[in-house]
């Protein structure tokens, strides 16, 4: 059966993962540097819980929203990245 080539991580994912890794003084696994989904799982398991504006969008939400944005050629508002609820509503409105 056909095995799709994994997508590389986005620059935003890499930047965020590096910030987490610096804060925790740990290395990002090699698989995470080569595969978007692997890095997403790593980020989800190591990111700080909550934030100033409440919980931000998950890396899975961001990946899915970026896919929708590419297909529909639309920009994702910046505030959606800081609020999981807003990102969820943007995804639902743009499916």
Image (cartoon, rainbow, N blue to C red):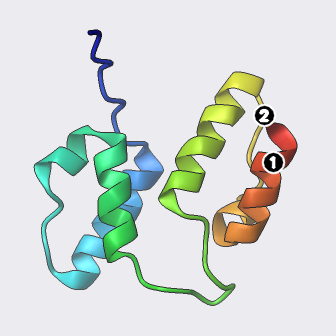
**Which quarter shows the N terminus?**
top left
Mark 2 surroundings within 10 Å by alpha-carbon count, few (fewer than 14), some (14 through 19), many (20 or more)? few
- Out of 5 and 75, give the one closest to the viewer: 5
Q: Is residue 92 above or below residue 44?
A: above
Q: Is residue 44 above or below residue 14?
A: below
Earlier in the chain: of badge 2 and badge 1, it is 2
Q: x and y percent of residue 78 in the render?
A: 72, 59
Label 2 vs label 1, nearer the camera: 1
Q: Mark 2 = which residue?
A: 74
Q: x and y percent of residue 7 in the render?
A: 36, 30
Residue drawn at point x = 36 percent, y = 45 percent: 37
Cα–Cα span, label 2 and label 1: 14 Å
Residue 43 as seen in the image, left or right of residue 86: left
Q: Mark 1 = which residue?
A: 92
Q: Is residue 88 above or below residue 53?
A: above
Residue 75 as seen in the image, left or right of residue 41: right
Residue drawn at point x = 14 percent, y = 56 percent: 29
User: From this viewpoint, which residue is outermost toward the right?
Assistant: 93
User: From this viewpoint, which residue is outermost toward the top?
Assistant: 1
Q: x and y percent of residue 76 in the render?
A: 74, 47
Name which quarter of the figure residue 50 lies in.
bottom right
Name which quarter of the figure residue 65 lies in.
top right
**Which quarter shows the C terminus?**
top right
Mark 1 surroundings within 10 Å by alpha-carbon count, few (fewer than 14), some (14 through 19), many (20 or more)? few
Q: Is residue 26 above or below residue 53?
A: above
Residue drawn at point x = 60 percent, y = 34 percent: 67
SS label for mark 2: loop
Name which quarter of the figure residue 68 lies in.
top right
Q: Which mark is residue 82?
A: none
SS label for mark 1: helix
Asked if labels 1 and 2 touch by Cβ distance under 8 angstroms, the answer is no
Marker count (numbered): 2
């Amino acid at each position: 059966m056909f095995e799709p080539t994994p997508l590389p991580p986005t620059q935003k994912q890499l930047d965020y993962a590096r910030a987490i890794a610096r804060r925790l003084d740990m290395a990002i696994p090699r698989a995470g540097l080569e595969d978007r989904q692997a890095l997403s799982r790593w980020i989800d398991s190591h990111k700080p819980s909550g934030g100033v504006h409440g919980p931000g969008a998950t890396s899975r939400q961001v990946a899915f929203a970026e896919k929708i944005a590419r297909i529909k050629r639309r920009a994702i508002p910046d505030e959606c990245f800081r609020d999981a609820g807003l990102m969820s509503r943007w995804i639902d409105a743009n499916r």
